[in-house]
Amino acid sequence: MRFAFRFSILFLFLFALFLLVGVAAGAPPSGFFLLSLFFLFAGGFGYWLLRPRSAPAESLTAAVREMKRGDFSARAAVPAEDTLAPLGQALNEMAEELQKTLAALQEQKRVQDTTLETLSEAVLAADAEGKIIFANSVLTSIFDLEGGPVGQPFHLVFRQPALLSAFEKVLQDGGSESVQIKETFPTHRVVNVYLTVPEKARTVRVVAVFTDVTQSYRLEQVRKDFVANASHELRTPLAVIKGYVETLEDGLIAPLERKKVFATLNQNIQRMGDLIEDLLHLSKLESPEFTLKREKLLVLDVVQTVVSSLKPQAVTKRQLLAVEVPPQLSLVGDRVELEVALKNLLENAIHYTGPGGRVTLSARSQNGGVEITVVDSGIGIPSQDLGRIFERFYRVDRSRSREEGGTGLGLSIVKHIAEAHGGRVEVESEVGKGSKFTLVIPG
Ligand code: ADP
């Protein structure tokens, strides 16, 4: 239509031109001249008619094209008096609305993406074909996935049979499933996976949330081991006591034997008592409410209290017990707890050093704090055990430690006390030569 209109205007112009050329060539001027003027005027008027109509239409077309490309900031420029003005206005209003909605959706997506990335859980979404269409970066780091899992089928990314069958079930039947997967290689890891089908989702079929519970699983394992160890440690002396009491009841023990029996009974009762005391102390140190009663202490004071309580044991073993502590050396700490820590270290030094050996307790100021050292010339500790002796119930020689009344909790208590003071306990040892334990208390 527009083309035909333009063609007729062109035709009018050409015709006017033809007439003017005719006039110039000597054709009778007046009629030709008037006719050419008329056609020129008609052509001009046609152009004028067409011109204002085509600009808004072109602007409308251009705006629609921009919007088709996704640019909703494009607007149609249509003068208010034009017949296309209502259409232009409607288009512009629609673009405005779409621009706002799009901006809101983009903002929502940014918030969702950020939320999914800041989660400590790994999140994954798969389509109806079982292909992964979304995964946050936590998933990649939990499972050390190379190249990113997006675009890959779920069953090629994960190999754990329990997880695959749960995924397949949710994919086919809907609903939700929970499964725990344990990995031992390359790292030990326990992960809880919850799979579900989101409501009203079109492209997403399955959403899976992975929670790394390795840490809590380990803690639970440690707790279980601790309870099992503690029960075992308590049951052993209890069984001995029960056995002797029954024999005593039956009157099967000769009067001369009785003294020995009562000594054994006492020893086992003592052992149970020590064990319960150490367990209670450990639980107190580990409780969140525990706080140190800090005060300024003279190190020599603390050391002498401990030494005087254990001197009889050293004397019995004819050991040389030496104290080398500067009289003015002081620290800020909890007197009772520090005495317990030093008593445990000194008790061990005496226990694990043979008759005639030497035990030295010394202290010095170091980096603004204090280092208290207990050195013995005893049996020493094999290098492979050094890393574990601070664990609860860990003993190098189980039977020997028990025989000598050890609970296996002493060094664990020392470590807790040192750490409660913001310090640490260190050990150096050589089998057959002796050990050196250092309690470091910062200033
Ligand atoms: P225990 O009550 O068995 O002594 P501890 O926690 O105090 O428990 O010590 C753990 C283990 O570390 C001991 O069983 C012993 O094998 C070893 N140990 C601790 N102190 C010494 C030491 N001074 N010399 C040799 N071995 C030691």
Image (cartoon, rainbow, N blue to C red):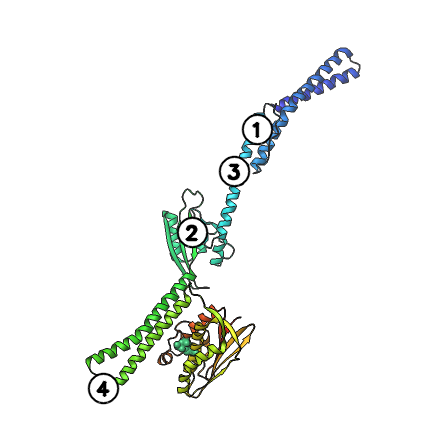
Q: Residue at x 20, y 79 (%)?
A: 249
Please report whichever mark, 3 or 1, sits nearer to the chain's N-terminal start.
1
Query: Do residues under tags 3 and 1 come within 8 Å of each other at their CB atoms?
Result: no
Please report whichever mark, 2 or 3, sits nearer to the chain's N-terminal start.
3
Side of 52 where 109 appears, left or right: left
Query: Do residues under tags 4 and 3 come within 8 Å of each other at their CB atoms?
Result: no
Residue closer to the observer: 287 or 73: 287
Give the amino acid at mark 2.
Ala
Q: Quadrant of residue 367?
A: bottom right
Q: Is residue 381 visible?
A: no
Please report whichever mark, 2 or 1, sits nearer to the chain's N-terminal start.
1
Query: Do residues under tags 2 and 3 come within 8 Å of each other at their CB atoms?
Result: no
Give the amino acid at mark 1.
Gln
Give the amino acid at mark 3.
Thr
In the rendered image, which residue does mark 3 sit on? 101
Q: Quadrant of residue 72?
A: top right
- Looking at the rendered image, the disc whose residue lies closer to the viewer, 4 or 2, is 4
Please report whichever mark, 4 or 2, sits nearer to the chain's N-terminal start.
2
In the rendered image, which residue does mark 2 sit on? 208
- Looking at the rendered image, the disc whose residue lies closer to the viewer, 2 or 3, is 3
